[in-house]
Image: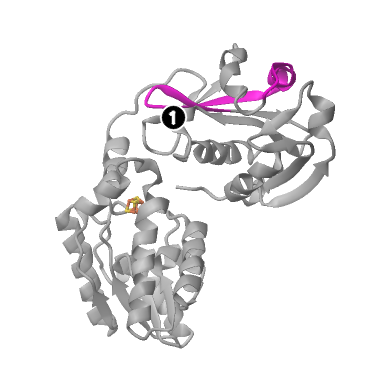
Amino acid sequence: MKLLMHACCAPCSVYCVDTLRKEGIEPTLYWFNPNIHPYTEYTARRDCLKEYSKIMSLETIFEEDYGLDEFCKNVIDDIDTRCTKYCYPVRLERTFQYAKENGYDTVTTTLLYSIYQNHDYIKFLCEKYSKEYGIDFLYRNFREGFWVGHDKAKNELNLYMQKYCGCIFSEEDRYNNSNSPRPVLPDNFEFLQTRRSIVIKKEKENKEQYMDLLLEADPEKEVIQKYLKDGELFVLIYKDKITCVAVVTRIDDNICELKNIATEEQYRGKGFGKKLIQYLFENYKNTYDKMIVGTTENNIPFYIKQGFDRYEKTIKNFFVDHYNKEIWDGDLHCIDMYYYSKDLKKEKKYK
Ligand code: SF4
């Protein structure tokens, strides 16, 4: 096996290299990280990897690209989804490309080591590029050794240990949010993730004020009123604007149901629905075993992508039996309701 391992930094490489060498695999490290800012931090991490490579007699390829301008241009429209939409893909795809052009047959990445990264999404991307480039992907759950590697990097090898993920926005999250007092939010509000521009409100009173938006996802007011009465309603607020709402009801002691989720038109396709769903998974994982959702055929791929990956059942004629008028979803005349579920106990924290 000729393995190229994308290396985000030296400390994250320690456990990965040790693990692979124990298996008899000798990786070549590949440094390509235009996501590390500012320049002094970029050079500190790069130079630390140079030093570590020397100590460990590792072959390491350094592809120099301090990419502040390019990075900012690519993430500025939606800073909150920067990791999955730009930062992981740009680094991983380049690694597969380099492997293809330079005679490596397998790729892996130290990004699979960090407990702070979106492990499943990184794995998904590697599998995707593996198919596209015809290069094998070597998967290991390096996170199992996170604290072992951390301890060795810090106390045994005395490596430079960075204090934040890499980009300038993660630096802000690390220092600004932790050192300055967080603004006080009214009752029933909480911050979503670390960026303060997104807030979730659990609405307890006057839930019908969101009826217009709820009707975007479920066209009959009487149907909504039935589940809204006992359902819990969550509102995602972005920069003080109502962006997305969701209603969740209890089915029994183990199961809850996502009855409605709707996003204001101007915010669609920007990941707000996904953020709200991920929040709901976190919010309910200690209360229920699973969350179900009923959907039309058209929306099945969307819900599967969000994590509702288990088919539960189909209720024939649901829309005919429960609604007073015909229900259309674009060109689709809705007849049956399809149920999918998410195992909440398996949920991981998404960045
Ligand atoms: S937080 Fe980390 S993974 Fe996400 S964009 Fe910034 S550097 Fe990349």
Q: Residue 49 in the image: x percent, y percent?
A: 25, 71
| Residue 257 at least partly seen | yes
At 43% from the left and 67% from the top, the residue drawn is 148
Q: Is residue 351 above or below residue 179?
A: below
Indicate left or right for 169 with 283 as reference: left
Q: Is residue 309 above or below residue 230?
A: below
Indicate left or right for 116 with 249 as reference: left
Viewer-side residue, 175 vs 69: 69
Viewer-side residue, 291 vs 13: 291
Residue occupying the far left of the picture: 40
Q: Is mark 1 on a helix, strand or loop?
A: helix
Q: Residue 82 in the image: x percent, y percent?
A: 36, 48
Q: Verify whether residue 231 appears in magenta.
A: yes
Viewer-side residue, 212 vs 88: 212
- Colour scheme employed for the rendering of this structure: one colour
Q: Mark 1 points at which residue?
A: 266
Q: In this view, does 127 lie above or below 351?
A: below
Neighbourhood count class around disc 1 (C-alpha, 10 Å): few under 14, some 14–19, many 20 upward: few
Stretch in magenta: 219-245
At 78% from the left and 24% from the top, the residue drawn is 323
Asked which quadrant contains residue 297, the reply is: top right
Q: Residue 350 in the image: x percent, y percent?
A: 49, 48
How many numbered marks are there? 1
At 36% from the left and 73% from the top, the residue drawn is 97
At 36% from the left and 31% from the top, the residue drawn is 196
| Residue 37 at least partly seen | no
Q: Verify whether residue 205 appears in magenta.
A: no
Q: What residue type is labelled 1?
A: Gln
